[in-house]
Amino acid sequence: MSCICQRPRQMDIRKGVVSLATGAGAVYLLYKAIKAGIKCQPPFCSASPICIARLAIERERHGRDSGELRRLLNSLECKQDPYTRSMILHSITRCVYLLESEASACTNDDITLVGSMLDDKDNSVKIQALNTLKAFSGIRKFRLKIQEHSIKVLELISTIWDSELHIAGLRLLNNFPLPDFVHPQLRRVMPALMEILQSDYILAQVQAIRLLSSLAQKNDLLYDILNCQVHCNFLNLFQSTQPGSLLFEVLVFAERLSEGRSSPHYRAVKWHYNEQSLHEALFGDDSRLADRLLALVIHPEEDVQIQACKVIVSLQCPQDVGIRPSCPPSHSCFNNGE
């Protein structure tokens, strides 16, 4: 009987010993894994932000080029599949931002090589090429060369309906002044820019309106912008429910248009606008812009409030108010009570 009673006890002891051994073994294996992980040097991967950042730090420490940017540009010349080309361009963009001296050592031929990727059949490659050109545009000596691709960028924006491509292309165009030789192409793509502005993708809308605001300051483009056709609900862009970042840019755009149309140079010509034009939506007799502006004066964001007030002032007084005794009422979109 005693032997029978001892068996379960012996089995419990054996189980405990096995559990203890298993636990100790697991701890030992975990220790080895951690130790190996600490000692292990991960394989170099140029596409990794950590690796590229390590290159930048190493360059700063030792005062020498890593050669990584040049290697990536050389690999771009080889025939690769679209995904690989896209990843190489993505890595080049990171290198340009992080490895300043290596980026400055690049040549116009490198810019031409990256620009040639805008003709790629794959949209993802086009988008990465646009991002790379934007990175290079931060280096002054490359801006003129990058400007040569402006017409191609405008063509892509106006013919391909892709929000990511719109954002990348518009960010590039907003990063430097557009040369005068691009103005004819700008007139042709104005309807596309206006469509992007009226889309539902905030980031693309903000970039589009920043470009339009810049173009509104060009005398030879102002009429083309004002006569551009817009949707009947265009003034929804001025609703207080819109994101503050978009509202602010829309108000800046409205102020510049108002100032431009009130300038002596513009008023010297009698312009005619179509019924669904931007001019009629903002400044026409039936426009409800004044109501939207008054609502924005009490907007929660101070920048929006101030900009709304600036638009109201520009609507009430022409730009050459300094040489006039008072603001003529015919130039105001507001009633006397307002």
Image: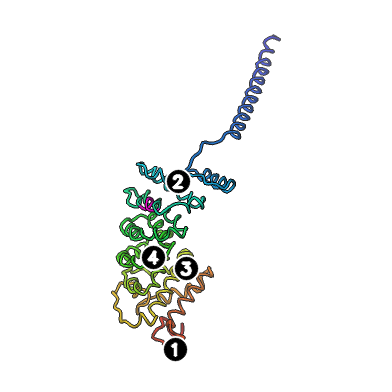
**Depicted 233 relative to depicted 172: above or below:** below
Query: Marks 2 and 1, how far apart in space?
Result: 61 Å
> For the view shown, which residue lies furthest in the bottom direction?
325
Residue lying at 68% horizontally and 16% vertically, measured from the top left: 9
- Residue 263, image x and y in percent? 39, 80
Kind of residue indicated by mark 4: Leu
- Residue 290, image x and y in percent? 42, 77
Give the structural element (helix, strand or loop) at label 4: loop
Residues in magenta, as a range: 111-115
Please state which of residues 223 and 249 is positioned toward the viewer in this rendering. 223
The earlier-in-sequence mark between 1 and 3 is 3
Query: Marks 2 and 4, how far apart in space?
Result: 29 Å
**Mark 2 vs mark 4: in front:** 2
Q: Main secondary structure of the magenta part?
A: helix
- Residue 129, image x and y in percent? 39, 51
- Residue 105, image x and y in percent? 47, 52
The earlier-in-sequence mark between 2 and 4 is 2
The earlier-in-sequence mark between 4 and 3 is 4
Query: Marks 1 and 3, how far apart in space?
Result: 30 Å
Could you tell me if residue 206 is visible in this image? Answer: no
**Mark 2 vs mark 3: in front:** 2
Residue linked to disc 1: 324
Residue linked to disc 2: 70
For label 4, count other residues whose C-alpha is less than 10 Å away and answer few (under 14), some (14-19) or many (20+).
Answer: some
Please state which of residues 247 and 92 is positioned toward the viewer in this rendering. 92
| Scheme of image coloration | rainbow
Query: Marks 1 and 4, how far apart in space?
Result: 35 Å
Image-quadrant location for residue 144: bottom left
Residue lying at 43% horizontally and 63% vertically, measured from the top left: 176
